[in-house]
Image: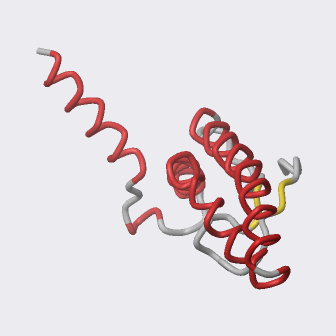
Amino acid sequence: MKLSKKLMLMLALTSAAYVPSSFAEEGYLSSVGHKFERGFSNLFMGVAEVPKNIHNNSEKMGYIAGGTSGLITGTLDTLGRTSSGIFDVITSPIPTKTLVEPEYVWNDFNKSSTFHANLR
């Protein structure tokens, strides 16, 4: 019984992220699906901010200073990106712009993440 409830929840969550090609224009359903997908990926991939920041800071400052500062900034960026993911998943029916740039952690891997509260 518990397994079937978990399976139904997983199917509901994965199907919510799927948007058919007939809705591929920037309509409401496309916007909601994209926001849910972005939030879900940022929720679970936010931890990739740590190696990203260590790599980027090590190239700028050297291995020791870059590794230390990258660990600190990566941890803070992980908290920010994960929080942004939680916000996007919960508020996915309300279309807003992303709170973090780049939109996904793997986009522009050499660019530092920036956070803003521009919801329009």
Count numbered badges in the picture. Answer: 0
In-image side of 119 versus 47 (left or right): right
Please give the name of the residue rendered at 48% of the width and 68% of the height, measured from the top-left corner: 24
Most extreme residue toward the front is: 64
**Residue 97 in picture, x, y percent from top left:** 75, 55
**Residue 19 in picture, x, y percent from top left:** 41, 58
Most extreme residue toward the top is: 1
Q: Nearer the viewer, residue 5 or 73?
A: 73
Q: Nearer the viewer, residue 115 or 98?
A: 115
Image quarter of residue 38:
bottom right
Please give the name of the residue rendered at 50% of the width and 48% of the height, measured from the top-left corner: 44
- The colour scheme used here is secondary structure
**Residue 103 in picture, x, y percent from top left:** 67, 64
Please give the name of the residue rendered at 53% of the width and 58% of the height, measured from the top-left corner: 30
Residue 97 against residue 84 in the figure, above or below: below
**Residue 48 in picture, x, y percent from top left:** 57, 61
Image quarter of residue 7:
top left
Residue 72 against residue 69 in the figure, above or below: above
Q: Nearer the viewer, residue 3 or 36?
A: 3
Most extreme residue toward the bottom is: 59
Please give the name of the residue rendered at 88% of the width and 47% of the height, measured from the top-left corner: 117
Quadrant location of the N terminus?
A: top left
